[in-house]
Image (tube, grey):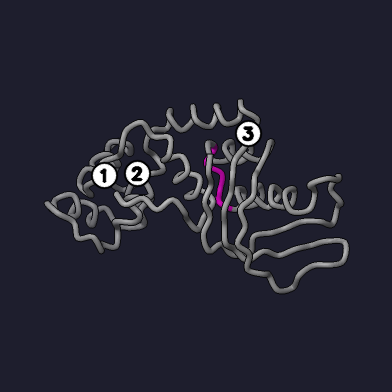
Amino acid sequence: MALPLSANTIREALDRADSRHWTRKPPLSMRGQLAYLFKQYRHDSAALAHRLQTDPAALRVLRTLEQTPQDHPLRPAVEREVIRLWQPRVRRRAHEAIIANNGHMMLSFRAWLGFTAAAGSSDDPRLRFLTLSLTAPYPQRLFAAQHQREPEEALRTILNGALSACYFHRDRPALAKESVSLERIDFLEFYY
């Protein structure tokens, strides 16, 4: 499984960062990955097909193939789901260790940012490439939202708060009108 560490959603970026803490590698073949997913979904092909945004018949055909082409349209969705589900206890232990050590996490991203400050707001989001250090309580909030399977919008709200804290509120208390918002994400990568 070729595992790029950056993603264009917060949830996927957190899952990919968690993969650095795995103690075993997930199945590499599509057949092995599907066998693992069917086991995780208790052989409910309809639920798995819904999650992968396909139909159960397509999954049955895919499971019978000896070798799946590298450019098969379901390959990225299957890999994302395996990454999301692989070694949940290992990832929780890693999250607990990070939180116990002051909850420090690095974030590197390229995205279009909108700003609101005392002088006004930006009508046109600006493309920025930044690497920032996120400190408590934001990593803990991101992990809690990830464990509770909060929607992407909830994760984005937490990350916007973290970016605002890093960007504006370094040496002084926050002002009510200062905030940063991610408008569009090109890529996002967490390090912890």
Pick whichever of labels 2 and 1 is earlier in the sequence. 1
Inspect the image, locate mark 1, and give the three-letter code of the amino acid beneath it.
Gln
Q: Which mark is residue 20?
A: none
Question: Element type at marker 3?
Answer: loop
Which residues are drawn in magenta? 148-152
Q: Position of residue 90 (x, y in %)?
A: 43, 29
Question: Element type at marker 1?
Answer: helix
Residue occupying the point 49% across, 49% down: 13
Pick whichever of labels 2 and 3 is earlier in the sequence. 2
Magenta stretch: helix, strand or loop mostly? loop
Q: Which corner quadrant of the image does residue 173 belong to?
A: top right
Which of labels 2 and 3 is toward the front? 3
Name the residue carrying label 3.
103
Q: Are marks 2 and 3 in contact (CB under 8 Å)?
A: no
Residue occupying the point 79% across, 47% down: 170
Q: CA distance from mark 1 to mark 3?
A: 32 Å
Q: Position of residue 156 (x, y in %)?
A: 62, 52
Q: Position of residue 20 (x, y in %)?
A: 43, 39
Q: Which mark is residue 33?
A: 1
Disc 3: CA contacts within 10 A as few (<14), some (14-19) or many (>=20): some
Inspect the image, locate mark 2, and give the three-letter code of the amino acid beneath it.
Val
Q: Vertical placement of 61 versus 142: above or below?
A: below
Which of labels 1 and 3 is toward the front? 3
Q: CA distance from mark 2 to mark 3?
A: 26 Å
Q: Are marks 2 and 1 in contact (CB under 8 Å)?
A: yes
Name the residue carrying label 2.
82
Considering every residue shown, the one lying at the far left of the view is 66
Residue occupying the point 67% across, 64% down: 113
Give the side of residue 154 with respect to residue 19, left or right: right
Give the side of residue 44 with respect to residue 162, left or right: left
Question: Element type at marker 2?
Answer: helix
